[in-house]
Image (cartoon, helix red, strand yellow):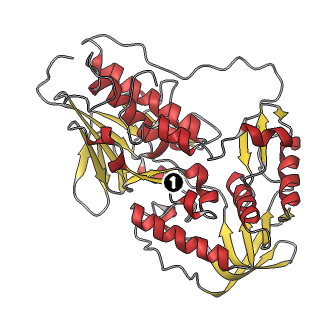
Amino acid sequence: MPLVNAPIRIAVAGGNYSGLSAMRELYLQLLATGPDYDGTKQAPPNPNVKITLIDRRDGFVHYLGMTRGLCQSDYGNKLWVPYSSMPWLLHPSISVKKGVVSRIASRHIELADTSDRVEFDYLVVALGLSRTAPIGVAASTRDEYLKDMDKQRALIGNAQSVVVVGGGAVGTELVADIKSEFPNKEVTLIHSHSLPIPGPLFTSEFRHSVANVLQALGVKTMFGERVVDESSASSNEIDAIPVKHSDILPELIDSVKCNATLTTSSGLKVYGDVVFNCLGVKTKASLIDLPSSNDEPIFSPNGIRVNESMQVDDPSYSHIFAAGDISSKDVLKFAGPASSGGRIAGSNIARLISAPSGENPVLDAPKRKAKGTGKPEYGSIKLVLGERHAVIQKGAEVVPTETAIHMVSPDIKLGKATRTLSIGVFPTHGK
């Protein structure tokens, strides 16, 4: 790459699976390019590029293991990895800026509580989706995270009865983890649909299998019931989490209630010493200020519209990419596709920057799936329901439950995430 008068500015808004994957790819393709780079030491400086990671947290959070982490302290404490433990992020061409993104415009990012803004030539939006705490993780530092998790575990440990509202993937895994770790507690799942894990991508067999495992564990399931009223005899014993910026970050709001009585749509009363709200996610559409150049809004119901190359699907924003849960690429919002999308976005920015002047490089894109057969298309999902049970759907097929548990990672892919994101080591080409 020839020397330029001013460095090309690349910003990545949001860390975690997609943001860190984009950062790692940018490191490999723009910084670790010398023939002597072997992953044993820092890549040499590159005066041509300036890469900035913006995140409200000071580390990576392995969300996949969060429900287990709320029940097991040794495991849960490993789920937060400080950025300072990733030596490649300390490269002189990379800076990590801690802050809350309040607005993304076509050429700059604004941060809350400051007049500073981050100008960019290329951008990867990797802000994800929002869940209320504790699943959404309100903490911004590892110390805050450890403190919050300890207090949540104390609430669960001291409770005789735990109620979880919402029977999606998070709600079902949470009740399974709690009941598996504390078999003598009364654990109840309230879900408005007739079976858990709603949606057209999941077969009836899969959903029945999930329900059967929960019942075998001893979870009381209340399907077809919606919570219409809630009264709490006392406030949450956890110290109040500051709700500043909660209008744009719902994860800053702790949704756990203590000593609460819930009334369902059929008039039933359900009491819980602790009640967890696992009712879906919220988008971050309000942060994206990118006017569309056509009749289609930039932010679709499934996220920011992107093309196969993860670029925003609008000719005005070919320099902006979106990856992970905030993008429209995947209907099912999982860590694997988020990491893949981040890698593709980072790779394509590197290709655009490195291409000779006037040339349009061939951009990377996800592998295309085979064309449909006319039959219903189903998703693939692995639900880890405690340490001894799992339910897996692969397309239209459901793996037998006695086999499924041997097909999931005992650490819920924490080790895989550590390796994939080069935590504690320098990235290596081809790995």
Report which quarter residue 379 is drawn in: top right
- Which residue occupies 42% across, 13% down? 362
Which is more toward the observer, 421 or 136?
Answer: 421
* Coordinates of residue 178 in the picture (x, y in percent): 71, 65
Mark 1: secondary structure: loop
Residue 382 sits above or below residue 429 on the image: below
Q: Is residue 106 visible?
A: no
Left or right placement of residue 78 versus residue 291 in this view:
right
Report which quarter residue 407 is drawn in: top right
Which is more toward the observer, 115 or 363?
Answer: 363
Residue 8 sits above or below residue 126 on the image: above
Left or right placement of residue 164 versus residue 419 in this view:
right
Q: Is residue 283 visible?
A: yes
Farthest residue, direction bottom: 233
Q: Which residue type does callout 1 highlight?
A: Leu
- Total marks in image: 1
Residue 205 sits above or below residue 74 on the image: above
Which is more toward the observer, 193 or 422?
Answer: 422
- Which residue occupies 14% across, 30% down? 6
- Which residue occupies 82% across, 31% down? 396
- Position of the N terminus by quadrant: top left
Left or right placement of residue 33 versus residue 305 in this view:
left
Graded by Cα atoms within 10 Å as few (under 14), some (14 to 19) or many (20 or more), the crowding at tag 1 reads many
**Which residue is identified by label 1?**
79
* Coordinates of residue 209 in the picture (x, y in percent): 86, 47
* Coordinates of residue 120 in the picture (x, y in percent): 27, 38
* Coordinates of residue 289 in the picture (x, y in percent): 39, 46
